[in-house]
Image: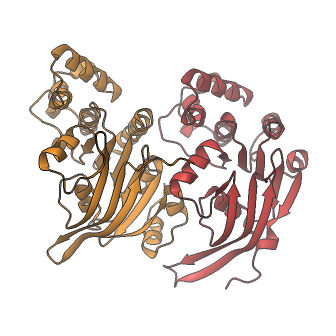
Amino acid sequence: MTRADPLLSVQGVAKYYGARIGCADVSFDLYPGEVMGIVGESGSGKSTLLNCLAGHLAPDRGQVLFDTRAEGLRDTVTMSEPERRMLGRTDWAYVHQHARDGLRMNVSAGGNVGERLMAVGARHYGEIRDSAEDWLGRVEIDTTRIDDRPTAFSGGMQQRLQIARNLVTGPRLVFMDEPTGGLDVSVQARLLDLLRGLVREMGLSAIIVTHDLAVVRLLADRLMVMKDGHVVEAGLTDQVLDDPQHAYTQLLVSSVLHV
Amino acid sequence: MNAMIDIRDVSKTFTLHNQGAAVIRVMDGAALTVDRGECVALTGASGAGKSTLMRMVYGNYLAASGSIMVGGVDVAQAEPREIIRLRRDVLGYVSQFLRVVPRVPTLEVVAEPLLAVGVDRDTAAERARELLTRLRIPERLWGLSPTTFSGGEQQRVNIARGFAHVYPALFLDEPTASLDATNRETVLTLIQEAKARGAAILGIFHDQEARDRVCDREIDVTRFTPGLAA
């Protein structure tokens, strides 16, 4: 039996917008190498939760414990802002739904990837450029485009560039907010295949927020279903989708059109 | 030695919240064991609960009560990550339908379970080539995604994938359906080889002759079906 410690331990997290509940009573452990999906309709609190976990929003209650390399489990809610920002540049990555929120649009593709390396101390120009080239290749962007700006890229390419920029520093935990949202179905499939390969090869843990059940079925080991700020059901992804227990999950699953 | 698969007093209900919260009791007191090297067939008419039972043992459906021991893990109680590990290392499942990420080449689809347990890329690819050859998938198709293949080809890819890793326990859902005689023969040989190396196999076979060839026992799931839906 594996008794490894969790990489992330979330305990009783809540966030309120005035009297309105953003999310409440959220607790779970995420173990190294696990990919967890969070699904729910718009306004269910899934993005609020993701932002609380990634340190973009301060929760009103609860702890978000992360297994730091130096000091083991630390509460990222109470750590100092510089410490949290350091995590955001090293062990954590955040893939935004809109690539332009996660990229610098007026900097070249290579620069976008290299910038994150420089943020963690890389200084050797040749090595940074080699890394950037390597990563563009891994996300299937033609390396002749290294000096082009992302404004000249298609939506799917921008999203792949954002992923390269995020993964180049070898993070241990990746937060993804609707990573395939707004992309053509054919482009989505390519991105999913790419993400799945990278997650396995790098042994990444990831939390993926989406409203697309097909995405979680392909990418996530575990699934959490949210409604009105609360987790209504959680479990193994295929079990939750094939044998949903909660009324809302049953409605969600039965509402998907099959093609 | 304990049985590889040991199911005791398992029941299953479905609550249909969006249809007047109807509670349907589909299984009661299900019990069976499968030893290493043994192949047990689940029988019973369509709708009797063969697939439901198999899905519960795989952790795909939640059991309402009872215990489902597979290789020392109680699937009815286990955490998701324990079931993920069980499925990766111990318990293989050849379903009737192939479900894959679009775009992934056939060779990769078949090699994937081996890569997941840490087999190196060359060995995994070698094993995948061997299985695809035995199951007569033409080599020119290996680099293509199986999503566009014919039903029979997809099923053979699915079987190759299911037999790639030497799982100690294996579930087979209609492994010989829609196969021609030659390929059916290959699949039956694969099953016999798995038994010989000690795999515990639980299967659904509508093909009576195949069942007679490879199965040691039959269990009629009708006896676990409650008489009336409550």
What residue is shown at x 54% (from left), y 60% (from top)? A239
Taking B69 as reference, is A122 above or below it?
Answer: above
- Tell me, by letter, which chain the rendering colours red: B
How far across and down, in percent of the image, does residue A3 sit? 50, 49
Q: Quadrant of residue A43?
A: bottom left
How far across and down, in percent of the image, does residue A178 sit? 30, 51
The residue positioned farthest toward the top in the image shown:
A126
Q: Quadrant of residue B153?
A: top right
What residue is shown at x 49% (from left), y 34% (from top)? B104
Taking B159 as reference, is B141 above or below it?
Answer: above
What residue is shown at x 55% (from left), y 24% (from top)? B121
B174 relative to A255 in the view: left or right: right
How has the structure been colored for display? by chain
Residue B172 visible: yes
The residue positioned farthest toward the front in the image shown:
A71
B193 relative to A234 in the view: left or right: right
B207 relative to A62 in the view: left or right: right
What residue is shown at x 67% (from left), y 85% (from top)? B230
The tint of chain A in the picture is orange
Q: Nearer the viewer, residue A155 or A123?
A: A123
The residue positioned farthest toward the left in the image shown:
A106
Residue B45 visible: no
Q: How many marks?
A: 0
Taking B115 as reference, is A175 above or below it?
Answer: below
How far across and down, in percent of the image, does residue A187 sit? 35, 40
How far across and down, in percent of the image, does residue B210 sit? 86, 46
Q: Nearer the viewer, residue A244 or A141?
A: A244
